[in-house]
Image (cartoon, grey):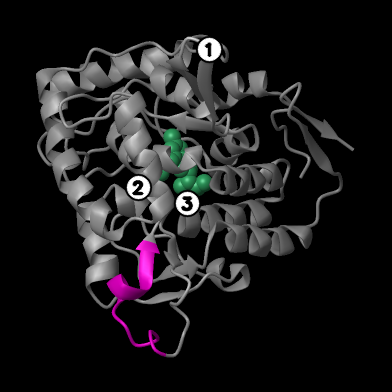
């Protein structure tokens, strides 16, 4: 645990530069590998993200017709499925994104607008009246591609989500081997406006700062089976009456990996996928699968329960120091 980690939100500029894969480095099995135009476009996104510094406005992207077409196809399909299977907090906040951030099937939203929304916004109700709606202060910042789990989770400690701005290759709108802006915007953004979810996310991040390799891997796995693939049960789901109900009767989905993938979402709730209680000691034994559907999913009653269980688990992790987040200075004190 003697490795460097960011002590201030400005240090995330350092994490953002350590991209593992982007642009020219596209793997041979990537759908865009042989497409020169796509590779050049990706280089442009990569450079924009690498030049970005904390505190600057996020560059607005003019998306191409092809990118907007890809977005629209996925948007239509996913919204249909969200309405059936997503949890209430996700749906309520997604409505707000549509109202305030330019979310629609014809428009790819801009990260800068989402940042402003997550901070909170005021609306004039009349000459002497306005309504302020505070959100969570979560921020997004552009990133050129995949980061190490350590760098990525460090962002969450500062309520910062490293967010790609490029769009997957148009050859296969329903498949991407890496995170792209469709995954981030359709899957992740809505819940960062939820206070309990934001707190849960930040606490995974804070636990990761300076963690041992072994603990970091556990935290990355907990992140994966909650924020990416988590489900929740409605209040009656554990009652004997519902115990034998089908997955879609018993569970709602909150994980971004599911809410941004029509195929895996349907696999998880429409079929007979294995869904078991989120218990960190059990979850960390599970393998994270990247190119296939997960072989099991995990649920909690709500975000508070996920939070409590995470806390009990991280309290037992050994670090030779204590980290304390200071929200006024957006920095971490190491004690
Ligand atoms: N990097 C980027 N750019 N986006 C992610 O969603 C992401 C990442 N996820 N690095 C991380 C790793 C995640 O799979 C966990 C923490 O390992
Ligand atoms: Fe993700």
C-alpha distance separating marks 2 and 3: 16 Å
Residue drawn at (13%, 30%) of the image = 34
Which numbered disc flags the more N-terminal residue, 1 or 3?
1
Camera sees residue 179: no
Q: Secondary structure at mark 2?
A: helix
Q: Which mark is residue 91?
A: 2
Q: Decide: is 178 above or below 45.
A: below
Which numbered disc flags the more N-terminal residue, 1 or 2?
2
Which quadrant contains ligand 2?
A: top left
Q: Decide: is 85 above or below 143.
A: below
| Residue carrying label 3 | 227
Q: Which residues are magenta?
A: 241-252
Q: Are marks 1 and 3 in contact (CB under 8 Å)?
A: no
Q: Is mark 3 within 8 Å of ligand 2?
A: yes
To which quarter of the image does residue 75 belong? top left
Q: Which mark is residue 128?
A: 1
């Amino acid at each position: 645990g003697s490795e460097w980690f960011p002590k201030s939100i400005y240090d995330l500029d350092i994490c953002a530069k350590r991209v593992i894969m982007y642009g020219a480095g596209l793997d041979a099995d990537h759908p865009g590998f042989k497409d020169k135009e796509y590779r050049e476009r990706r280089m442009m996104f990569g450079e924009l993200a690498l030049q970005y510094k904390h505190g600057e406005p996020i560059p607005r992207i003019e998306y191409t017709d092809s990118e907007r077409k890809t977005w629209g196809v996925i948007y239509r399909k996913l919204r249909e499925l969200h309405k059936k299977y997503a949890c209430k907090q996700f749906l309520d906040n997604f409505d707000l994104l549509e109202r305030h951030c330019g979310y629609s099937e014809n428009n790819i939203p801009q990260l800068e607008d989402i940042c402003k929304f997550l901070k909170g916004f005021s609306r004039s109700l009349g000459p002497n009246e306005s309504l302020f709606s505070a959100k969570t202060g979560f921020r997004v910042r552009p990133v050129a591609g995949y980061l190490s789990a350590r760098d990525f989770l460090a962002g969450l400690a500062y309520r910062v989500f490293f967010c790609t701005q490029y769009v997957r290759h148009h050859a296969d709108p329903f498949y991407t081997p890496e995170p792209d802006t469709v995954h981030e915007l359709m899957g992740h953004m809505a819940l960062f406006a939820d206070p309990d979810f934001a707190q849960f996310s930040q606490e995974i991040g804070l636990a990761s700062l300076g963690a041992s390799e072994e603990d970091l891997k556990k935290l990355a796995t907990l992140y994966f089976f909650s924020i990416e693939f988590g489900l929740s049960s409605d209040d009656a789901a554990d009652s004997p009456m519902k115990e034998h109900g089908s997955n879609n009767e018993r569970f709602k989905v909150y994980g971004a990996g599911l809410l941004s993938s029509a195929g895996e979402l349907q696999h998880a709730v429409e079929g007979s996928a294995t869904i078991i209680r989120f218990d960190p000691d059990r979850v960390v034994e599970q393998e994270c699968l990247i190119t296939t559907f997960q072989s099991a999913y995990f649920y909690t009653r709500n975000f508070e329960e996920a939070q409590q269980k995470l806390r009990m688990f991280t309290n037992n992790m050994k670090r030779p120091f204590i980290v304390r987040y200071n929200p006024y200075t957006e920095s971490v004190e190491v004690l």
